[in-house]
Image: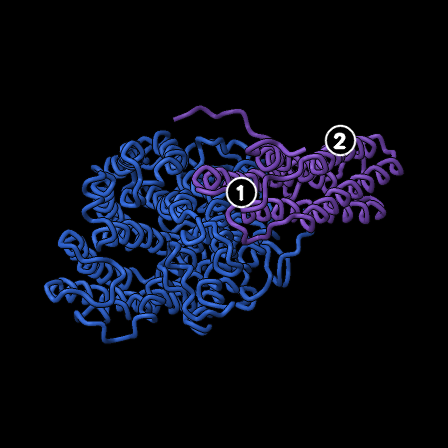
Amino acid sequence: MDTPAQPAPIASAHHEEPDNRMFGVTILLLSESMLFFVFFAAYVALRLTSPRWLPAGVDGLEVIRPAINTVVLVSSSFVIFFAEKALERNNLTLFRGLLLLTSAMGGYFLLGQAIEWRSLPFGLTTGQFGSTFYLLTGFHGLHVLVGILLQLGVFARSFVAGLYTPEKHFGLSAASLFWHFVDVIWLILFALLYLWQSPAVQG
Amino acid sequence: MVELSDGNLGSNKPHQPPANWRVYFSFSTDHKVIGIQYLVTSFIAYLFAGLFAMVIRGELMTPPSDLVDRSLYNGLFTMHGTLMIFGWIFPSLVGLSNYFVPLMIGARDMAFPRLNAVSFWMLPPAGLLLMAGFFVPGGAAQAGWWSYPPVSLQNPSGSLINGEAVWIVGVAIYGISSILGAVNFVATIFRLRAPGMTLFRMPIFVWTTLSAQIIQLFGIPSVTAAVVLLFFDLEFGTGFFNPAKGGDPILYQHLFWFYSHPAVYVMILPAFGIVSEVLPVFARKPLFGYKVVAISSIMIAALSFLVWAHHMFASGTPNWMRILFMITSMAIAVPTGIKVFSWTATIWGGKLRLTAAMHFAIGFVAMFLFAGITGVMLASVPVDIHVNNTYFVVGHFHYVVYAGTVSGIYAAIYYWFPKMTGRMLNENWGKIHFWLNFIGLNLLFIPMHQLGLLGMLRRVASYDPQYQPLNVVASIGGFLLGVSTLPFIFNVVISWTRGKRAVANPWRALGLEWTIPSPPPVENFAKIPVVTGMPYGYGLIEPTPAQPTASE
């Protein structure tokens, strides 16, 4: 038998402590990343086995505008990080401003996606290429939308006194972590869909 | 004390168990209420799925297809599989875990009580949706619970709302519910353990729940992705899996089995845990090799993700992959064997009390050994290619899931019923239930192995007359199983309303869940206990597993 170990920290009667909730959000995002990982795996598998990858009349995806979109989305990750820092310094005005800026950048990204979708010469059922493209970007776009809604929810709740303090702001931390997650997924997606193109990358 | 919304428990006074049955129909956040909600709901699904099985066995009494028409028969075996797995096995084990994991680790509730309630309340709609499949145009899904394309993409009715689509949505809802539940369990086990409850002092049931829920967390996204892609193929005419459009049906099999093989360990691991709890209590001996058993659960969880392609030995898998997966599949036998050894060594020379729960636990060990051996046979490529898609496979996994898991669930119910309801189950009826169940399942599943070796395919409604004698034996066993459920239901209903009052610790068991009154008060522990030893110190100087935090 083992000797009595050091007693663990006392589990308090308070259930949903912020750090427990952040732990929960983290493992939920791990599960989510598995979902995207499986979609990526399916994409790669289909791409490598498809006899004709590009549909007739399509010679790849335009890269420039999505690249600008990517830069905006990645920057917004930094913006929300600084929003959190501003709240920790108790600078509420800056925190709210940066949070709104993040949502605006996310909105710009979604709008860019929508414009791109409208301009593309292929549809959802145009072979594996079209199916995987719309599925992956659509699923990611859905996550971006959820992220924006979370940020707007945090923004609205920040006007309620006592909900967000410099020490305690679980909602913001969760929205921020989710946003970083969406960002990282997009980088992988961008590399797979836009940068890995055959024959040559379109200008 | 934090104000918690405690459903409709009326008062929040301690030692006030939910006496009101209405609480079970409310959005309660008490893990004990949710556990019982899970158990009862899943049992209803079990009865429906069992009813389908009775129809299937009735159909197979005679060689021609004469009892039900073929599309309905296909729908019946599809729904039997789906409801048994997603509607009964998963939720009932989650219900037991929900009830007992917080009690066993000394927590007041799960980490996220409201999320817990959300996880549960997703189940009834999902189950109703699956059942609704019988009433949509074209009838229920007919592609088996694997739902392989291109068969699942046929959609004979041509309508947008068809059995397959309903099946996909139902399974996806079950999946989301399970992921949320898994997050809850992992957070609970890692974050809410009582002081002194180190990882290697947790009961094995907590370990196996943890392993199973980790599998759920990382596996379910895969099957969710697979059925989402299938849904697009079915409803929007994409071509992910449709070979006619250049898709890859084998890809679906990979995505599906990448979760659905680990899923069978989700079904069996908590049952391992239950047996590891029950055997030491009724043998009055410590669990043999506790640490190794705990680690082997995690090993099974890790290995389970490396064996999925053994379901695809006959799908044109290249030889190098076959060999690889043959080796990994056989390797699973090692941690599993460790557990069987541990149980055998635990009851070796013990002072056995053959209660109903002990009957089911010993039955589990014997039957699971049989199931595991046929599993190793199936892992071998040549054997698998011979019996692929035959009744041998059906016999094997029914031994695992029915003779194994369901026996484990029954053992858990006989063992923990006093704790859950504050009343004792009738032991004699429990033993009658066990023997009917035991004889029935062996009559039903042993002939299946022989049928499979002779070449009878699974999922057929009509077969060659040479298979009839064995099928009749199996059907009789099946009906006996159906009958065996009756004493159990009556026993539970009558005991729950009028049974003998149970004391806090009727089996003289160790473990935190027995240190509190039966049924437990709303807050579980008047004071959070401090754990000072192992939960399996039987036969030694009776140690106390816990002590109150401070002097009263």
Q: In this orientation, which residue lies closer to the viewer: B289 or B86?
A: B86
Chain assignment, label 1: A
Q: Residues within 10 Å of mark 1 (few under 14, many from 20)?
A: some
First of labels 2, 1 by sequence position: 1
A70 left or right of B531?
Answer: right
Rendered colour, chain B: blue
Q: Where residue A78 is drawn, which disc sits there?
A: 2
Residue type indicated by callout 1: Leu
Rendered colour, chain A: purple
Q: Name the residue under label 1.
A: A54
* Quarter in which the C terminus of chain B is drawn: top right
Q: Is residue B90 above or below residue B128?
A: above
Q: Image quarter for residue A67?
A: top right
Q: Where is residue A126 in the image (x, y as percent from the top left)?
A: 54, 51
Q: Are marks 2 and 1 in contact (CB under 8 Å)?
A: no
Q: Position of residue B97 (x, y in %)?
A: 46, 48
B402 left or right of B162?
Answer: left
Mark pair 2, 1: CA separation = 36 Å
Question: How many numbered circles are shown?
Answer: 2
Chain assignment, label 2: A
B164 left or right of B462?
Answer: right
| Residue at image point 24% right, 67% down | B461
Q: Determine if residue A111 is in view.
A: yes
Q: In this orientation, which residue lies closer to the viewer: B332 or B530?
A: B332
Q: Residues within 10 Å of mark 2 (few under 14, many from 20)?
A: some
B457 left or right of A52?
Answer: left
Residue type indicated by callout 2: Phe
Q: Where is residue A200 in the image (x, y as percent from the top left)?
A: 59, 31
Q: In this view, does B8 lie above or below A93?
A: below
